Image (spheres, helix red, strand yellow):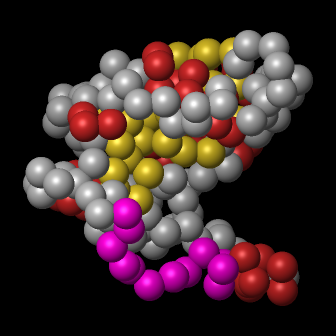
Amino acid sequence: MKLSVVIIGRNEGERLVRCLDSVREMTPVEGGVEVIYVDSASVDGSPARAAARGARVIPLPDGRPTAARGRNAGWRAASGEFVLFLDGDTILDRDFVRRAFAGFSDPNVAVVWGHRREIRPQDSIYNRVLDLDWIYPYEPQCGPCRGKTSPTRVMPCWIAGPAMKGLNVDPGS
């Protein structure tokens, strides 16, 4: 079960370094991990930082940089059976993927997601409000797309399984 990790970003700098390091430090995945960084015209050296950490860098073509365009570019380039989408400022919980893969044992599950948490909610009321906003109860989501795991640190967007391969994440991009 090869996993492709698609990270999107623009001018992420040291946040991207932390993200890539957290991917490298996750619980090992049978079948290997491919890391793809889709860059939206960074001017801070983010593509070089990603390449230096072993990620394949894909520059987003000209046009309005959006998360959907970045994810679609990474999705198209991914060769893994499963695809994990992250933002460049994400710190991946080291056991998220292991726990998420357990959700795919149900043949009706196509996507597994996790909760987002702020790193330092105590630093400001703004961080605390955002942290509270990301916490919501587990409930089945759109039939087979139901969440089954929760990381304790920051945000894995979602992992798409084989049933989703080839689907355009955003028809407008």
Query: How far across and down, in percent of the image, does residue 27 sit?
Result: 29, 50
> Is 34 placed above or below 93 here?
above
Residue 132 within the segment the image draws in magenta = yes
Q: Residue at x 54, y 59 (%)?
A: 155
Q: Is 53 positioned to the left or the right of 119 in the image?
A: left
Query: How far across and down, in percent of the image, does residue 143 sit?
Result: 29, 63
> Is 87 placed above or below 54 here?
below
When asked about the image quadrant of residue 45, the answer is top right
142 vs 96, nearest the viewer: 142
In the picture, the quarter occupied by the N terminus is top left
Residue 126 within the segment the image draws in magenta = no
> Is 89 placed above or below 138 here?
above
When asked about the image quadrant of residue 135, the answer is bottom right
Q: Residue at x 33, y 58 (%)?
A: 145
Task: Note whether residue 98 is visible.
Answer: no
Query: How far across and down, in percent of the image, does residue 152 sit?
Result: 45, 72
Residues in magenta? 131-142
150 vs 169, nearest the viewer: 169
